[in-house]
Amino acid sequence: MRIMPSGFMKICQKFMMLTVISFIGLLSLNGCARYAHNVSALYEPSAGIYGGTGEVYVIIPESQQTQSSDVKWGIGKITDGDNMKIDDVVSPRSPAEIIQAALVLELKKGGYTVTPTTKHHDGEQQVIDITKAEIKLEQVSALADLKATCRVLVGMDVFKNGKMVKRLQYESESSKTDVKDRDFLAKSVLEEALQSIMLKATPDLHGLFKK
């Protein structure tokens, strides 16, 4: 019978203890549901247009305007590693409001005077009517990490001097996997998907208004 040296046994015991502690930590991390349930984008303009003039009205449907702070808009879901739904992803603003706000910031930075609204008004010379606004934000909360994917779809009709000049549509997707900052991962992919849309849409709109 071979007897292992006591020093070696202590090393093995320490290694086993660290392994168990790490495993328990991962279980705790998953069990505490560390993911974002409530998501609101703080958009940072990125398109970099310049020389815009005049007033632009950015319109969304009235049904997409939040009427109360108690209202939450469903924009996605959270599943576990076995693809079972464990929670919803909600936002204090509707998808149309999120997209409208991002577009307003981009155009204001580009030099335009911008009015967000839900209705057409007489005398409008430059109008962006957001006809389609979809945000789908999915999170997969596995044992060791979190994956977040956001897809954004935007459709808009562009008017100038009372006439529709162009119908535009844009789509983008952002995805990330991380073991840290799990609470901020959903917000990050939403912002990236929005910026990708704006990098395409804002120069197109600017070109139409400058004609």
Image (cartoon, rainbow, N blue to C red):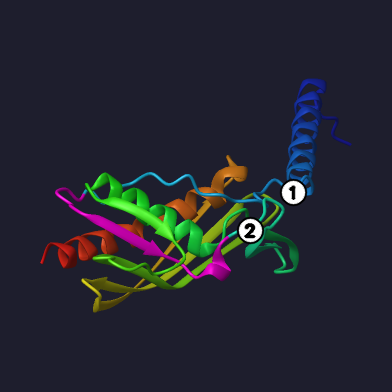
Cα–Cα gap, marks 2 and 1: 30 Å
Q: Residue furthest right?
A: 1
Q: In which quadrant will I find the C terminus?
A: bottom left
- Residue 109 vs 148, above or below: the answer is above
Quadrant hosting residue 26? top right
Q: Amino acid at mark 1?
A: Ala
Q: Is residue 29 left or right of residue 133?
A: right
Which residues are drawn in magenta?
49-65
Q: Residue furthest front?
A: 122
Q: What is the x, y in percent for residue 167?
A: 29, 79
SS for callout 2? loop
SS for callout 1? loop
Q: Residue at x 74, y 49 (%)?
A: 33
Q: Amino acid at mark 2?
A: Gln
Q: Which residue is mark 2?
A: 67
Quadrant hosting residue 82? bottom right
Q: Which residue is mark 1?
A: 33
Q: Is residue 49 left or right of residue 175?
A: left
Q: What is the x, y in percent for residue 183?
A: 62, 44
